[in-house]
Amino acid sequence: MEDNNSPQSESPRQSAGKLRGLDRVLGWIERVGNALPDPVTLFLILAIGVILLSALAAAAGLSVVHPATEETVTAVSLLSGEGLRQMVTEAVQNFVQFPPLGPVLVAMLGVGLCEQTGLLSAALRWGVSATPLALISPGIVFLGVMSNLASDAGYVVLTPLAAMVFAAVGRHPIAGLAAAFAGVSGGFSANLLIGTLDPLLAGISQDAAGFIDPGYVVNPTANYYFMAASTFVITLVGWWMTDKVVEPRLGSYGGDRTPEDEQTLTASERKGLRWALYALLAVLALLALLVLPPNGVLRDPETGSLVPSPFLNGIVILITLGFLIPGIAYGMAAGTVRNDKDVVKGMSTAMSAMGYYIVLSFVAAQFIAYFSWSNLGVIVAVNGANLLEASGFTGIALLLSFVLLSAFINLFIGSASAQWAIMAPIFVPMLMLLGYTPELTQLVFRIGDSTSNIITPLMVYFPLIVAFGQRFDKNLKIGTLIATMLPYSVAFLMSWSLFFALWFLLGLPLGPGAGIQLL
């Protein structure tokens, strides 16, 4: 007989009480966040704040020594004549070069056409009917993690599709969007394959290791074993958080259900899906001819490598074609596309829905540029790293503190490569002197960097997720999204850190030829 007074057992009343307590905390966070102005206005206020703060920091003479270049980085006032001229003359350039803008708009040409022709609706209804409902949540989180192979395309493609999948089966679409966002961004470094981030971070780590050992080599596969195993950890934790915490808090979805939610596929839709599949297979076959041969056109012309390569650099346009061509094939077969004018109209309609995001991107781009020009991000990052270095922690305590520091700094510097370029020259040599490999330091950084992506509005794709969410809930604001994603962030941070601690204590290799301790 089970002992109900046992510490291992928990009554339903206790569980319900914990959920109510969590709901109160998240509700408070949501109310505070939603009390903030519209995201466009918020980024405008933040931009003005950076301008004023930069003037104060410059007047106070704030500066740090950049660990990579050993040059003194000083706070720059944007209220100076030079700063004002820069803000005026480079505003358009900031907007045009805003990292998510181009990929988002280009990808939406293909995705939007598929939506307008009816391909997405038909494919989702077919997929939902063929997939066990119990596997939808873990499947979406897993696909989110794996989508990192396609650079940032997971943000653009998977998050809105996941919301549509949840809506199609009668579940809350914001929960689907959150599950995909958690996998794509919260599990950013985990993957079963080597992605574009691996060689980028390895190069920075190798340069930093050169301060201690000029001949030290850090391979792109340095963290492969741990990150491949982490894929399943993130998937399981994301699954549990979606079904047990996030979706119950959202409640039932009150949005309109479209008629196709209850309809079976018509004969024309089935015909369209067949031709869309034929078109997709043709696209994939052509890509295989361009990528798989050792001298493939989309491989690196000098090294023949796939990482990096034109294939990975051009993944956004390839994904667009992967949606566009099947979308046209579906429309022609199903009768929703009769001529080229229908194709152009479908893409134009998709672009018209991105108006708010374009406005938001313009203001967000200015804020991010101002933050960079003022050097405030570098100053915050370096000072935070120096505090951890001076803390006196050793062993696993030091490494877990480094995870927390990386997560904190990521709230201010959204780019993993930019953040690692600042932190690596400090921590890689420091931990090498303590006997730890550069591969270990890089791995610890990646855990912290990934887990706080989903709760910072300064992450460049955060406004896009808000815009996608507002398709299903017009009242969704920054606070709502932060409150929705915070349980994922905390759960990922705790579970990933515990998984790392276990890996560390067992002394398992991090990747091929990459251990924990220096020999």
Image (cartoon, rainbow, N blue to C red):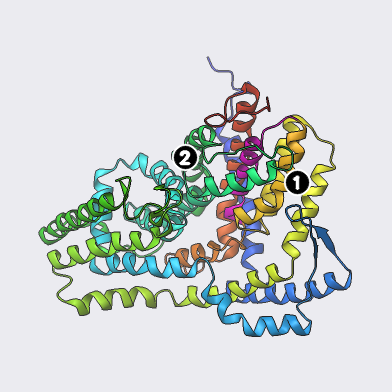
Q: Which residue is mark 2?
A: 235
Distance from disc 1 to disc 2, alpha carbons, whole Å, reads 32 Å
> How many numbered badges does the structure rendering display?
2
83 left or right, relative to 242: right
Residue, far top: 1
Of helix, strand and loop, which one carries label 1?
Answer: helix
63 left or right, relative to 427: right
Q: Could you tell me residue 16's position as x and y percent? A: 57, 40
Q: Specify the segment rendered in magenta.
A: 435-455
Of the pair 213 and 43, the residue shown nearer to us? 213
Residue 5 appears in view = no
Q: Amino acid at mark 2?
A: Thr
103 left or right, relative to 77: left
Q: Earlier along the polypeptide chain: callout 1 or callout 2?
A: 2
Numbered label attached to residue 151: none
Magenta stretch: helix, strand or loop mostly: helix
Numbered label attached to residue 426: 1
